Image (cartoon, helix red, strand yellow):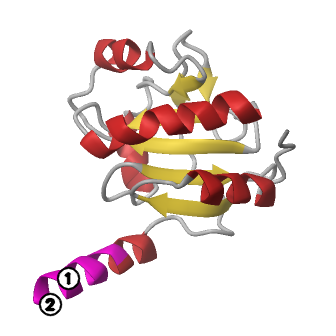
Amino acid sequence: MTKLWTLLMAGALSLALAVKPGEPLPDFLLLDPKGQPVTPATMSKPAVIVFWASWCTVCKAEFPGLHRVAEETGVPFYVISREPRDTREVVLEYMKAYPRFTPLLASDRERPHEVAARFKVLGQPWTFVVDREGKVVALFAGRAGREALLDALLLAGADLP
């Protein structure tokens, strides 16, 4: 029972620390694979931002389902590795299997793991659903279930098929 309680409290604490629904996205400047700057102001919205790591087994299991949602809805999915050792080459190679995702890469100003820290992300995967005004409408720490993600996209103002 003590182990379960500790896990539940850690999960509650991590959610309490993260950027919350109703809050605007923290400022950041990363690059898309073509070298174009991406900031909260330039992102297409509504959108989904997923923090992940190349070694994360939960991410590996979740990405095919998330990619299907991206394909079906047309909503942009931005993926940001929170692993400092995930180089540009590692990220781009990993993302070949997920062409609907836009991986965000390091810029001269900051690194992806620094952006994760600004979002107060403590693990992976962490998924943020963002509305047209750039405010978070939903946060998933761990796997984001398909129906819950689709509901969050509706809340964000996405025109779903």
The 10 Å Cα crowd at callout 2, few under 14, some 14 to 19, many 20 or more, is few
Identity of the residue drawn at 52% across and 64% down: 19
Q: Main secondary structure of the magenta part?
A: helix
- Number of the label disc, if any, that sits on residue 1: 2
Quadrant containing the N terminus is bottom left
Q: Is residue 99 magenta?
A: no
Rendering coords of residue 43 (x, y %): 70, 34
Q: Is residue 105 left or right of residue 131?
A: left
Rendering coords of residue 38 (x, y %): 61, 29
Question: Real-space Cα distance between discs 2 and 1?
Answer: 5 Å
**What residue range appears in magenta?**
1-11
Disc 1 is placed on an element classified as: helix
Q: Is residue 8 magenta?
A: yes
| Mark 1: amino acid | Leu
| Residue 152 sits above or below residue 78 on the image | below
Q: Is residue 119 left or right of residue 81?
A: right
User: What residue did someone put label 1 on?
Assistant: 4
